[in-house]
Image: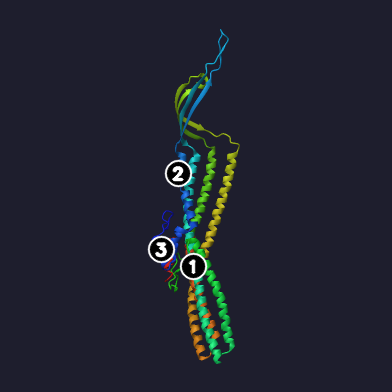
Amino acid sequence: MKFMPFVWVACIGMLSHATLQAADLMNIYQEALTQDAQFKSARAAYEAAQEKIPQGRAGFLPNITLSGTRQVQEVDAGKIVNSTTGLAINPGANIVQSGGITISATQPIFRMQNIVIYQQAKIEVSKAESQFITAGQDLILRVAQAYFDVLDAQIDVEVIETQKNAILRQLEQARRNFEVGVSTIVDTNEAQARYDLTLSQEIAARNALEIKKRALQGIIDRLPENLSGAREIANNLATLKYGSMDEWVRTAEEKNFTLKAQQAAYESAHQNVKRIWAQHYPTLDLVAQYSNQIGVGAAITGRGIDLTSQSIGLQLNVPLFQGFSVQSQVREAMALQNKALHDLENTRRNITIQTRQQYLNVTNGIAQVKALKQALVSSQSQLDSTILGQQVGVRTEVDVLNAQQQLYAAKRDLAKAYHSYLMSRLRLSAEAGELDEDALIQINAMLIK
């Protein structure tokens, strides 16, 4: 894969230039890398997941604590009775001070649970990486789909405008012919009706174009203008990397990042069973302590002493009985492990189905584009023949309008089929786990300017 989680870099310097000229698919994608909020969220989630490794490694490192105390006490000595005079004497209160510091260090020697936690952390990081790459592929698909949706909407507007202008010319011609008496009012009414209908269709097409632009704006955070699209359809529709459907399916089962993330989720669930079971294991720690205390016993005797102690040794903990809570947690974890296994199998089946569908969409898309290109040629020939027939009096203006409408519809259908074919190629690459910037560059190159 060309893009990895640590190399998502946008070419900021290109953006201002791209907004001045017609922006192509790669220009829009470069903007989306830095502007799309959904992708930014995925990047932040990936960065957060990287901290799982140092957190898991912390279980092997020593735990050191420092504590200190400082106390000032006022001790009342009480009254003393003189045996001769029988009078009470109050010697007053004594001020005593005590305190100290204690440093404790615990170095785990054997804690099975910490070992499993560290292994689980590495799996979680691997899962996060697969999810982030999936988010990157999803960004490419969302950008491309929104880009082609705008192009399709622009084509609809262009076709409606061209059709409206042609109908307007036919309407004006029909009016002139009616005025001079060479045609009936029927031709004029037919052209007028078509013109009025086209006006309403133009309003709807322009509204749809604005909606599609707003959808792309949600990705790049600006209203897109001057998007460049294919002015002609490439004759070479580019051969697929793998020749058969089964090869694509095998590749998807090996490389699909959604499947890899689900596989990591299952492995994490398996490690979670081991982590909980590890609570049955004994733990062994190396424990050291240094203590320096002053004024010990001063509150009782009025005169404290200073004590310094040092200790080092091994601490063994053997769990004997915890109220069956561990056994219950193990059963719960095993059930979740089975759930993750079934989710993994379900994901694999869905990816297999999606890969086969996208492969069929690509192969059928190639056939459809070729057929529509031929239909466009035939529609142009039909229009030329109809215009000639009108000139010699064997075709009416209505026939010309119908032929023109068929030609415009063929142009629109061809462009949309071509965009759909390109999107199917991107989706097929995504299912196979091979969608990256190189694949998008290839698609962008197929949009002939």
Residue 11 percent location from the top left of the image = 40, 60
Q: Are marks 2 and 1 in contact (CB under 8 Å)?
A: no
Q: Earlier in the sequence, mark 3 or mark 1?
A: 3
As drawn, is 22 to the left or to the right of 358?
Answer: left
> What's the mark number on residue 148?
1
Q: Secondary structure at mark 2?
A: helix
Where residue 18 appears, as percent x and y from the top left, is: 41, 65
Does residue 60 lie above or below 440 as drawn? above
Spot occupied by residue 431 in the image (x, y as percentages of width and height): 49, 60
The type of residue carrying mark 1 is: Phe
421 lies above or below 261: below
Going by the numbered disc 3, the residue's amino acid type is Ser
Classify residue 330 by image quadrant: top right
Q: Is residue 134 visible?
A: no
Between circles 3 and 1, the one closer to the viewer is 3
Q: Nearer the viewer, residue 295 or 106?
A: 295
Task: Please give the residue where the numbered disc 3 appears in the rendered image.
Answer: 16
Q: What label does residue 54 carry, if any?
A: 2
Whole-number angstrom distance, CA of label 3 to CA of label 1: 22 Å
Mark earlier in primary sequence (3, 2)? 3
Viewer-proximal residue among 325 and 179: 179
